[in-house]
Amino acid sequence: MSASLASALTIILSIIVTIVGIIFFLPQKNKDKFGKAFAKCHEFINFKTLIIDYVLKGMYILSTAMCIIGGFLTIFTVKTYYTTTGTMFNQSREAHSSLSVDNLGTGILIMILGPILVRIIYELIMLTIVGVKNIIEINKKMDCCKGDEPKTETEKPTFAEEPTASAPEESEAPDNTPTF
């Protein structure tokens, strides 16, 4: 199969799968129609289930491990420098390798500051995810209250018990106008 035929076939089949997905998976009325597996697929396609937090947590662990391991390996990297000896026409290059104090400082900085910076960056990203999860949870809790009709402004609220303490009634001020 040629690359162009494979590309065209991929596009056509993807369009068909998209149309089928829109017809069957997206509508809310089809959620419970085909069983639990379909309901999970419906939740996944409609972004009711978020997987980005698991992906980000995995990437955080990977990034932190890379900082620590990379810093450790940086400490033990060898600097290679070359020296030339001899005359202009008869030169020889010799390679010399050694551990460097610069590598020690750089490696320790990477091992200490790397995970701290990675943590700060991922916490800022996770704030968004946690906020979205909280909003979703609030919406789920609000869905249970949708059956209640909202009270109008003219309707007085009902109490389980009538309030016992009432505000004292204002008495009229005495009339201090002189009478003739």
Image: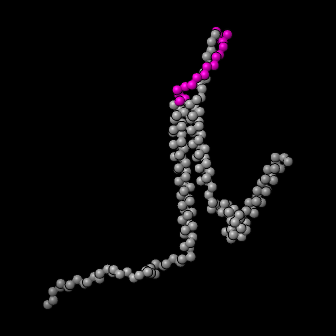
Extreme-right residue of the structure: 1
174 above or below 114?
below
Residue 20: x and y in percent read: 75, 63
Residue 151: x and y in percent read: 49, 78
Q: What residue is rendered at 53% in x and 58% in y?
A: 131
Whether residue 19 is in magenta: the answer is no
48 above or below 126?
below
Q: Is residue 167 left or right of residue 74?
A: left
101 above or below 136?
above
What residue range appears in magenta? 87-104
Q: Is residue 8 left or right of residue 163?
A: right
120 and 68: which is toward the camera: 68
Which of the 4 quarters of the picture holds residue 114? top right
Q: Quadrant of the C terminus?
A: bottom left
Residue 24: x and y in percent read: 73, 66
Which of the 4 quarters of the picture holds residue 38? bottom right
Q: What residue is rendered at 56% in x and 59% in y?
A: 133
**Residue 107 shows in this picture:** yes
Residue 62: x and y in percent read: 61, 44
Q: What residue is rendered at 51% in x and 39% in y?
A: 113
Whether residue 96 is in magenta: the answer is yes
Q: What residue is rendered at 61% in x and 19% in y?
A: 96
11 and 156: which is toward the camera: 156
128 above or below 83?
below
